Amino acid sequence: MVQRMIGSQQLGTGGSSGYQYLKSTLSDRYKVFLDLFNLSTFLVPRHMIPPLTKQMKTKLSIASYNWITDEDQDETVDSLRSSYINLPMTQQTS
């Protein structure tokens, strides 16, 4: 995380007193799981990613509706949820 925040160049935090300490924690001796650390920059080529199933596409499209806060659209979201996920329509209070 430190490497992502300060990077490998001395820009921005280069003059702060904590910079040297944070930079020292970037050494491999502090990385318990070095393979997992390196995985953060690993990208899978698009052609190697399996296609989503129809069921997963439906679940992902419904998940995006959970962020809608407009009261006018609440009924639409509830009806979509109940038709695709077969959940009973209930009024939730927060």
Image: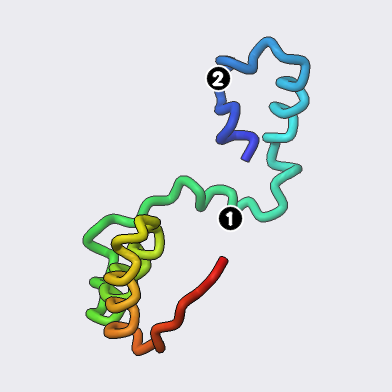
Above/below status of 60 relative to 22: below
Please name the residue that numbered disc 2 is placed on: 9
> Amino acid type of disc 2?
Gln
Name which quarter of the figure residue 49 lies in: bottom left
Above/below status of 55 relative to 75: below
> Amino acid type of disc 1?
Leu
Apparent side of residue 29 relative to residue 34 in the rendered image (left or right): right
Chosen colour scheme: rainbow
Q: Report the residue at 27% width, 70% height from top.
A: 76
- Measuring from the top left, give residue 91's x and y in whole percent: 46, 77
- Measuring from the top left, give residue 54's x and y in whole percent: 23, 80
Badge count: 2
Secondary structure, mark 1, is helix
- Measuring from the top left, give residue 24's x and y in whole percent: 74, 29
Q: Report the residue at 36% width, 60% height from top.
A: 71
Q: Characterize the local packing of mark 1: few (<14), some (14-19) or many (20 or more) Cα atoms within 10 angstroms.
A: few
Is 28 or 2 nearer to us in this picture? 2
Label 1 – label 2 distance at C-alpha: 22 Å
In the rendered structure, find residue 36 and report the number of the disc placed on it.
1
Q: Report the residue at 35% width, 89% height from top.
A: 86
Q: Quadrant of the C terminus?
A: bottom right
Secondary structure, mark 2, is loop
Apparent side of residue 67 relative to residue 76 in the rendered image (left or right): right
Name which quarter of the figure residue 47 lies in: bottom left
Q: Quadrant of the N terminus?
A: top right
Q: Earlier in the sequence, mark 1 or mark 2?
A: 2
- Measuring from the top left, give residue 83's x and y in whole percent: 27, 85
